[in-house]
Amino acid sequence: MEKVNGIGGVFFVAKNPDGLGRWYREYLGVECAPPTYDAAPWRQDAGPAVFAPLPESTTYFGEARRTWIINFRVRDLDALTAQLLGVGIKVDVDPETYPNGRFARLHDPEGNPIELWQPMGPDAE
């Protein structure tokens, strides 16, 4: 059976798409879709990803009105957290270390939840 081999994009509605795109580029290093087909899109490092439909009753996203969360793999959670805190972005680091790694949560300027994941064990690079 043929199958997909990774996430090809994340698309969502924003109140201020240009401003939100700049925020993701400046603080997380994520480039938005290029303006032309000749320009290269953002390249992510190869690694594990989780695809998980959740029940409508989930509290995983924080607020009930939120219906998505994006999880970004990071190499050094402490370094990125310090960098974000240094520019005034609130980040909540989960104090627990799980078998698959460490996690932190933050929100973009429009309140969308973001999870940062530093893989450990066989998922670490």
Image (cartoon, rainbow, N blue to C red):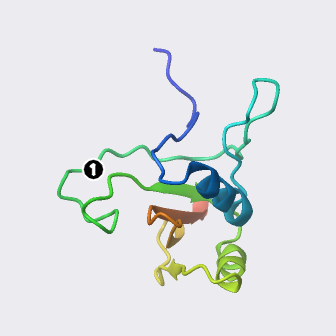
Horizontal side of residue 48 vs 15, given as left or right = right
Q: In screen coordinates, is 38 left or right of 72?
A: right
In the displayed structure, 75 sits above or below 78; it is above
**Position in image of residue 12 (x %, y %):** 46, 44
Outermost residue on the left side: it is 57
Residue found 53% across the figure and 46% down from its top: 49
Mark 1 lies on residue: 54
Q: Nearer the viewer, residue 105 or 32?
A: 32
Q: Amino acid at mark 1?
A: Leu
* Residue 66 position within the rendered picture, expressed as x and y whole percent measured from the top left: 32, 58
Look at 63% across and 83% down and name the residue there: 88
User: Which percent across, then down, holds residue 2?
Assistant: 50, 16
Q: Where on the picture, by quarter, is residue 28?
A: bottom right
Query: Circle 1 — which element?
Result: loop
Which of the 4 quarters of the picture holds residue 26?
bottom right
Question: Of residues 31 and 103, which is closer to you in this image?
Answer: 31
Q: Is residue 78 above or below residue 46?
A: below
Q: Tell me which residue sits at (43%, 56%) in the image.
A: 69
